[in-house]
Image: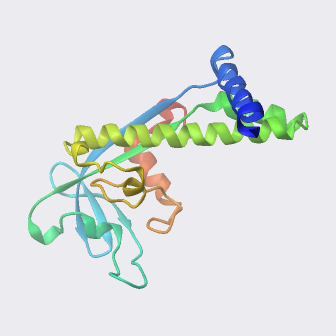
Amino acid sequence: ELVETEGRPRLRGWLDKLLTENLLEAAVVYGYFPCVSKGDDLVLLHEDGTERTRFTFPRQRRGRRLCLSDFFRPEESGERDVVGLQVVTVGSKIGAATAELFEANSYRDYLELHGLSVQLAEALAEYWHARVRAELGFAGEDPDSVEAMFDLKYRGARFSLGYGACPDLEDRAKISDLLEPERIGVK
């Protein structure tokens, strides 16, 4: 009942505000890069096959002891693979609006708008991830259930820096060098 009487109307109000005040500046920058795996490393290559940059991923401590590089063609296969990278943003206007709410001690509004902006950024990342899988030709392999998607039972999973599979936040600089996200206002 609370969702219907208070939650949905407040969400609708925030969505209307995003539109009427032009607060949402959603943008994406992405690219595909040739790569090979080498042990725990994913090596991104220049077109001539020389190393462009590399990412090192931790191995699981138990079970199959996998790491992200295990899901790419190994260097010794003689074949290249491809990795897709993306940066998404909902823009700086929402950040400015949430900062104003915080400064005005409007904490409920601040938390709601901040939470909405985070969820919109996540939705944009997932939407674009579906597009990337379609461009790579395997979106048709997606499972039918949401639960199977959550269990990563599909090809071309999306991982974010800072989580267990790729915890090194300093890798953001490498991605920034590759994608130049300042083109969409991300610094």
Q: Residue at x 49, y 53 (%)?
A: 172
Picture residue at 83% right of the left edge, 33% below the top? 101
Q: Is residue 168 left or right of residue 32?
A: right
Vertical arrangement, residue 96 with respect to residue 22, above or below: below
In the rendered structure, the answer to whether residue 69 lies left or right of residue 100 reads left
What is the quadrant of the N terminus in the image? top right
Q: Quadrant of the C terminus?
A: top right
Using the rendered image of the protein, determine whether residue 158 is visible from the camera's viewpoint: no
The spot of residue 47 in percent (x, y) is 17, 48
Q: Residue furthest bottom?
A: 62
Q: How is the image coloured?
A: rainbow
Q: Count the numbered circles shown.
A: 0
Horizontal side of residue 170 vs 69, given as left or right: right
Task: Provide residue 72's location: percent of width, then percent of height.
Answer: 23, 63
Q: Is residue 39 above or below residue 186?
A: below
Foreground of the two, 165 or 134: 134
Q: Residue at x 76, y 31 (%)?
A: 5
Q: Residue furthest front?
A: 1
Give the residue displayed 55% in from the left and 39% down from the top: 121
Which one is in front, 98 or 150? 150
Q: Looking at the rendering, which quadrant does residue 10 occupy?
A: top right
Measured as percent of width and height from the top left, residue 29 is found at: 41, 36
**Viewed as shown, does residue 42 lie left or right of 22?**
left
